[in-house]
């Protein structure tokens, strides 16, 4: 059983998605923390608002927690990785889609929709397809062909919409249609994201000192915070690990609010937003930004920004030191931890769990020029190979 409540004023309600105070709601579990013998994230069904995995949703979560020793030297602390790229469509969004689609099915919906050209679109389309629901994805007019191909492969109706994309969500919610549109941070999705923490806390040999994750809308950070509170309520944690929220310097409203000691996150004006390699984390008006800020503060963590160069370098380190291909946005936790270490906020003997949120495979063919490949003539092969492994 779960109750819909506001994280900020504690008010309980039966209807969402927002509290009267303006902040987003989440589900507070009042069920027992008793892991079930079910696959992936459904081990924690007791803490979810649904108990009926449908289609691909049954494969969400259950991602590995890896001790990645070779990242310690570059991160400046003891690094663990909870690899969210290993979800069925390659991002943590699948945990949210699993709950959202299960709930849509329960409510008798036949069609769901989303406004996204990234992982949210792919995850929603794939999970809907597997559950036999129609899916509509609204994308900006200039969405790159590679993106369209990935989204379209799951068979949704993809509609390119000209004009200001930022206002599209509000507009579609006002259209009186039978398609249920999902925002990036509804309570169902947040509940799904929380299972990432339920898994890692129950699997980690010792409670970590800190967690680091990328943030855009602040939905994932909110889910992770919810998961930490659940684990503390179940006495699996005495102290909450510090939550480090990492943004791209190209669009970092949450970092700015943190540094300014502001109560709330304000939207960035369009002329303060830059292009970035981190295409999944550029939201200048994060609907759960203030909640992500609250999570960092309440746990004694911080919000930091990193540059494109730092993201590209961190992406390379993930691959070359941990064998993990992550997208540039998902490399943010490693880049952020490096920055925090330099500031003296993290000690070398502390353990930090990085949460890379999405696979790098989807960025193939997008022009990463950091790889150098040699050609070698056959008669030079022996000599060349002699130098390898020296
Ligand atoms: C959606 C997404 C994020 C940002 O998550 P929010 O919930 O919007 O803060 C980060 N990384 C990847 C790979 C994503 O797809
Ligand atoms: Zn409230």
Image (cartoon, helix red, strand yellow):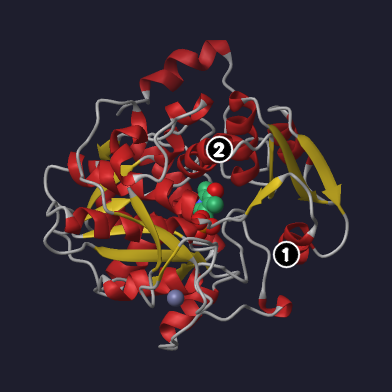
Tag 1 residue: 170
Q: List x then y, in percent, for residue 192.
A: 42, 45
Q: Is residue 188 left or right of residue 158?
A: left
Element class at badge 2? helix
Q: List x then y, in percent, for residue 304.
A: 42, 71
Is the residue 60 above or below the residue 280 in the image? above
**Is residue 328 at least partly visible in the picture?**
no
Disc 1 to disc 2: CB gap under 8 Å? no
Element class at badge 1? helix
* Image quadrant assignment for residue 26: bottom left
Tag 2 residue: 101
Residue sitting at x 36%, y 50%? 194
Residue sitting at x 60%, y 45%? 120
Q: Is residue 88 left or right of residue 141?
A: left
The residue lying toward the viewer, choosing from 39 and 31, is 31
**Which quarter of the rendering shows the C terminus?**
top left
Residue 365: which disc? none
Q: Is residue 176 left or right of residue 197?
A: right
Q: Is residue 114 left or right of residue 10?
A: right
Q: List x then y, in percent, for residue 376.
A: 57, 20
Determine if the C-beta at disc 2 is less than 8 A from ligand 1. no
Residue sitting at x 59%, y 24%? 130
Alpha carbon separation for disc pair 1 and 2: 21 Å
**What is the total number of numbered labels drawn onto the structure image?**
2
**Is residue 388 at least partly visible in the picture?**
yes
Q: List x then y, in percent, for residue 302.
A: 34, 73
Determine if the C-beta at disc 1 is less than 8 A from ligand 1. no
């Amino acid at each position: 059983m779960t109750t819909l409540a506001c994280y900020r004023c504690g008010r309980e309600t039966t209807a969402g998605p927002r509290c009267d105070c303006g902040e987003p709601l989440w589900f507070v579990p009042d069920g027992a923390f008793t892991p079930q013998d079910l696959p992936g994230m459904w081990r924690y069904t007791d803490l979810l608002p649904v108990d009926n995995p449908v289609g691909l949703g049954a494969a969400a979560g259950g991602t590995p927690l890896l001790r990645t020793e070779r990242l310690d030297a570059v991160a400046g602390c003891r690094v663990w990785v909870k690899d969210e790229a290993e979800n069925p469509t390659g991002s943590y969004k699948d945990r949210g889609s699993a709950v959202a689609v299960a709930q849509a099915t329960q409510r008798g919906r036949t069609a769901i929709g989303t406004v996204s050209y990234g992982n949210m679109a792919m995850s929603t389309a794939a999970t809907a397809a597997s559950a036999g629901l129609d899916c509509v994805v609204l994308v900006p007019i200039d969405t790159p062909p590679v993106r369209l191909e990935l989204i379209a492969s799951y068979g949704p109706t993809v509609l390119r919409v000209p004009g200001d994309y930022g206002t599209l969500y509000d507009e579609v919610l006002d259209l009186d249609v039978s398609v249920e549109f999902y925002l990036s941070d509804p309570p169902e999705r947040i509940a799904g994201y929380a299972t990432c923490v339920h898994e890692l806390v129950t699997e980690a040999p010792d409670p970590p000192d800190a967690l680091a994750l990328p943030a855009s809308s602040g939905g994932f950070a909110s889910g992770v915070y919810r998961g930490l509170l659940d684990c503390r309520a179940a006495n699996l944690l005495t102290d909450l690990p510090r939550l480090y929220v990492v943004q791209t310097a190209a669009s970092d409203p949450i970092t700015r609010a943190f540094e300014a000691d502001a109560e709330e996150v304000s939207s960035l004006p369009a002329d303060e937003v830059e292009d970035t390699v981190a295409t999944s984390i550029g939201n200048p008006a994060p609907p759960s930004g203030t909640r992500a800020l609250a999570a960092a503060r309440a746990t004694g963590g911080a919000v930091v920004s990193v540059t494109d160069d730092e993201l590209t370098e961190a992406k390379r380190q993930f691959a070359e030191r941990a064998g993990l291909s992550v997208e540039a946005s998902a490399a943010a936790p490693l880049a952020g931890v490096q920055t925090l270490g330099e500031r003296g906020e993290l000690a070398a003997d502390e353990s930090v769990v990085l949460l890379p949120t999405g696979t790098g495979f989807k960025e193939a063919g997008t022009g990463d020029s950091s790889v150098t490949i040699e050609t070698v003539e056959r008669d030079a092969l022996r000599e060349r190979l002699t130098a390898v492994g020296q």
